[in-house]
Image (cartoon, rainbow, N blue to C red):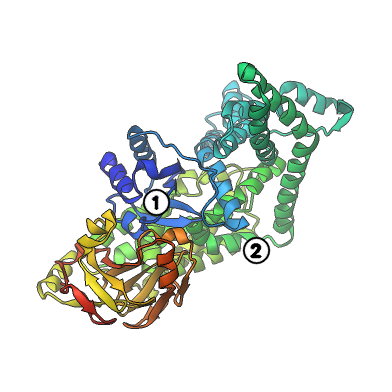
């Protein structure tokens, strides 16, 4: 695989490296925040060879690549430095849930490899002990054990540094603040149990090892103290005074106020999870088994990281996500393998086979975005199988003893004090696998057309007529005052200078996306043509003002149905060009796009023809 070519393809579709304000990655996804999203289309990113899928969630573009994501990130980093104010106030205010989700994913995504490393070393130690290769009283066991525990024990430091990176604070000062929480002298004070005070204020004695929320709160405070310290520090001694002010304010406040607050929040979350596990043990694994694909797809699974880590620290295991996600991942594999066996499309068979095996090992994005979500019915089978398998895991009290990607490659994370735990874990995934496979087989799916069939249908030269979305004057695409549209980078098509503000559907089809600013709508017509209707040039900057949308994602429309109304006079008074551009974003799937002659046109008259 040519990672440099993949990196170039992604950058071309997101406006170049200079348009990226923040970049990170997790195990399988490249995560980008962009300065200008005007001409960025998710469907175009998906067409880059090697990209499995792409979604936009909470203002962040998540590009699913698979386990090769690190190589792509390395290639992007070689192409230039990413400069951008990630904390810049967004043009459109996000709701608090989206902001929290974005923040949590930004903090924990970079830490996942370290947590997986510790978890997998712990799982390896469990296997070595189980098969008698290492004894629990040996020095080898002792060393491997503390190597495995290190990422979790020093989590306050790692979380502090990651939070500082997210909030644009000094990472090393932040790491030092996190380190104070687990300093040996403070641990000695905790062990002694005698009252401690700082300038007369009581310090709560708490063991912060493996905690996460206290560090996040501490660096949140630092993000305000650091600019203040920078402002009041004399230039001549700023190098000395700035870190001094930050450290001497943030660390004591953390010990006196924020640390206990964060600890209590984390403990409450862990206690809540344990309460559910003790009283309605079937509930959480059932829900996780059913809805894990949707959580992963939207990025909401990151919100469970703090209570999971706290549960490990408090109880030595977690039952929040591990059991249900184990079943769900295996179900993704089952659905993909069922598709691979049943499909007659050679390309789909190859993709589904590879994705199925990968999902069984614990990495589900290729299966989800490349097979089950794409074909829909297999995804329903995954959710049903995941729910039933999760229910079994729940009623039998299955727990995960350490971190790790849930899959057959890391089954040892379920080996612990209860010898039946791993047995019930395997039974639960077996139930999920069988149900999902059978449901996928009998529910069926819309088998993709093979390339040979595509070529045969192309030889018949079907014609698809796309209508003008408004009354006005047709112009050539090359005359549009926007280089991206004029150069046909996003696809071929046409443009109309509208006579009024009514925009109608140019074809029969299904609405794929309504941009939040309502200035653009994409749909797929009944023949498979993906059509983008873009109203005006740079009108995204109006943030939806003067625009009214009458459709939403998933609606079916007919040619001539009203899509959007906009106040043409007001938009033009703001200084914006109101030319409506209509593009076929999957132009490469057809022989050609032939525009109609320029001149006056009425809505629903031919704008161009796809052949």
Look at the picture and state if 460 lies above or below 492.
below
Q: Residues within 10 Å of mark 1 (few under 14, many from 20)?
A: many
Farthest residue to the left: give it: 459
Residue 322 seen in the figure:
no
**Could you say which is closer to the camera, residue 436 or residue 268?**
268
List the residue tagged with mark 1. 64
Q: Is residue 50 left or right of residue 387?
A: left
- Earlier in the chain: of badge 2 and badge 1, it is 1
Spatial CA distance of label 2 from label 1 is 30 Å
Viewed as shown, does residue 472 lie left or right of 243?
A: left
Q: Is residue 148 above or below residue 306?
A: above
Q: Which quadrant would residue 494 be assigned to in this image?
A: bottom left
How packed mark 2 is, by other alpha carbons closer than 10 Å (few <14, some 14-19, many 20 or more), is some
Q: Nearer the viewer, residue 515 or 528?
A: 515
Q: Quadrant of residue 531?
A: bottom left
Q: Which label was assigned to residue 283?
A: 2
Asked if the residue under mark 1 is in contact with the one under mark 2, i.e. CB atoms within 8 Å, the reply is no
């Amino acid at each position: 695989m040519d990672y440099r070519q993949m990196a170039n393809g992604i950058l071309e579709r997101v406006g170049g490296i200079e348009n990226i304000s923040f970049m990170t990655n997790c195990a399988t996804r490249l995560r980008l925040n962009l300065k200008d999203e005007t001409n960025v289309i998710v469907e175009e990113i998906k067409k880059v060879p090697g990209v499995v899928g792409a979604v936009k969630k909470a203002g962040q573009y998540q590009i699913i690549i698979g386990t090769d994501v690190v190589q792509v990130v390395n290639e992007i980093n070689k192409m230039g430095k990413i400069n951008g104010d990630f904390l810049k106030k967004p043009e459109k205010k996000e709701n608090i849930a989206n902001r929290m989700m974005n923040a949590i994913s930004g903090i924990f995504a970079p830490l996942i490899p370290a947590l997986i490393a510790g978890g997998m070393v712990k799982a390896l130690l469990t296997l070595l002990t189980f098969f008698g290769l290492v004894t629990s009283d040996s020095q080898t066991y002792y060393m491997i054990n503390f190597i495995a525990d290190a990422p979790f024990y020093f989590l306050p430091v790692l979380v502090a540094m990651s939070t500082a990176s997210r909030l644009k604070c000094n990472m090393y000062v932040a790491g030092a603040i996190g380190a104070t929480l687990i300093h040996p002298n403070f641990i000695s004070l905790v062990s002694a149990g005698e009252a401690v005070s700082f300038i007369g204020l009581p310090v709560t004695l708490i063991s912060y090892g493996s905690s996460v929320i206290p560090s996040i709160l501490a660096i949140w405070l630092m993000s305000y103290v650091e600019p203040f310290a920078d402002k009041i520090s004399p230039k001549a001694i700023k190098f000395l005074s700035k870190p001094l002010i930050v450290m001497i304010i943030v660390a004591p406040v953390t010990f006196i106020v924020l640390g206990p607050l964060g600890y209590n929040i984390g403990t409450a979350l862990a206690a809540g999870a344990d309460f559910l596990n003790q009283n309605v043990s079937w509930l959480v694994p059932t829900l996780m088994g059913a809805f894990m694909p949707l959580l992963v797809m939207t990025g909401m699974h990151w919100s469970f990281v703090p209570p999971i880590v706290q549960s490990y620290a408090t109880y030595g295991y977690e039952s929040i996500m591990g059991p249900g996600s184990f079943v769900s991942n295996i179900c993704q594999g089952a659905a993909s393998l069922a598709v691979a066996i049943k499909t007659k499309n050679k390309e789909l068979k190859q993709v589904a086979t590879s994705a199925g095996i990968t999902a069984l090992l614990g990495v589900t994005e290729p299966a989800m975005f490349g097979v089950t979500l794409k074909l829909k019915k297999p995804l329903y089978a995954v959710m049903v199988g995941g729910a039933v398998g999760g229910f079994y895991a729940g009623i039998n009290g299955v727990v995960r003893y350490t971190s790790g990607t849930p899959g057959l490659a890391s089954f040892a994370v379920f080996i612990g004090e209860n010898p039946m735990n791993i047995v019930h874990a395997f039974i639960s995934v077996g139930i999920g696998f069988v149900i999902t496979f059978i449901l996928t087989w009998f529910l069926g799916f819309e088998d993709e057309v093979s390339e040979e069939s595509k070529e045969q249908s192309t030889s018949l030269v079907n014609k698809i007529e796309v209508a003008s979305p408004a009354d006005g004057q047709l112009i050539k695409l090359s005359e549009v005052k926007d280089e991206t549209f004029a150069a046909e980078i996003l696809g071929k098509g046409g443009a109309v200078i509208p006579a009024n503000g009514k925009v109608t559907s140019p074809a029969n089809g299904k609405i794929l996306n309504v941009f939040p600013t309502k200035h653009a709508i994409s749909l797929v017509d009944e023949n498979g043509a993906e059509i983008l209707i873009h109203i005006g040039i740079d009108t995204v900057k109006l943030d939806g003002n003067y625009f009214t949308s009458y459709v939403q994602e998933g609606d079916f429309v007919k040619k001539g149905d009203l899509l959007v109304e906009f106040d043409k006079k007001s938009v033009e008074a703001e200084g914006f060009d109101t030319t409506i551009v209509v593009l076929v974003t999957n132009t490469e799937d057809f022989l050609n796009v032939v525009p109609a002659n320029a001149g006056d046109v009425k809505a629903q008259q031919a704008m161009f023809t796809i052949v």
